[in-house]
Image (tube, rainbow, N blue to C red):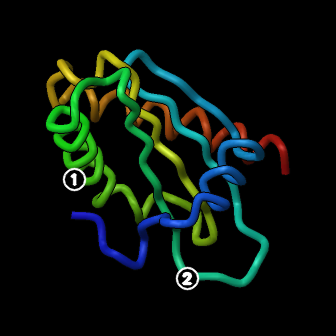
């Protein structure tokens, strides 16, 4: 699972990452990646958004758990002071884990490239 120190909890952090972050989307999810400039927790911070469009509460929680499990080993690939918001889309509810992993990896690569291009 995703360590507690790497979980995003404040709504302001979500908003900042979504508004200022580099966006990359795939069929099952969209990621928003940005770099923090303020002093805060060390290491990357990740937040998840799974709306009612994905399904009922049980389905949404299952999707969140699957995304957290997929994101945990990928934390080392993120820049040290990064914030990442992963937003699940409707097809994520029925997607197999390998499809979610492929979409997540592709979206992370694209977002990271866009962050580097902005710098």
> Nearest the camera: 105 or 18?
18
| Mark 1 vs mark 2, CA separation in Å | 20 Å
Residue that appears at 46% across and 42% down: 86
User: Toward which corner of the image does residue 67 lie, by quadrant?
Assistant: top left
> Nearest the camera: 13 or 23?
13
Instruction: Note whether 72 is above or below 37 in the view shown.
Output: above
Question: Residue 45 location, x and y as percent?
Answer: 51, 66
Q: Residues within 10 Å of mark 2 (few under 14, many from 20)?
A: few
Instruction: Note whether 92 is above or below 31 in the view shown.
Output: above
Q: Is 98 on the left or on the right of 51, as rendered? A: left
Q: Is 117 on the left or on the right of 11, as rendered? A: right
Question: Residue 9 location, x and y as percent?
Answer: 49, 66
> Nearest the camera: 13 or 75?
13
Q: Which residue is mark 2?
A: 42
Q: Which quadrant of the figure contains the N terminus? A: bottom left
Residue that appears at 40% across and 32% down: 51
SS type, badge 1: helix
Q: Residue furthest right?
A: 119
């Amino acid at each position: 699972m995703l360590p507690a120190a790497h979980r995003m909890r404040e709504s302001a952090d979500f908003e900042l990452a979504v508004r200022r972050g580099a966006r990359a989307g795939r069929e099952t999810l969209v990621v928003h990646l940005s770099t923090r400039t303020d002093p805060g927790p060390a290491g990357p911070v990740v937040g998840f958004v799974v709306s009612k469009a994905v399904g009922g509460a049980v389905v949404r929680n299952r999707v969140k758990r699957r995304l957290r499990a997929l994101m945990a080993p990928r934390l080392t690939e993120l820049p040290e002071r990064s914030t990442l918001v992963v937003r699940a889309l409707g097809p994520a509810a029925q997607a197999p884990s390998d499809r979610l992993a492929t979409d997540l990896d592709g979206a992370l690569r694209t977002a990271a490239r866009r962050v580097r291009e902005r710098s």
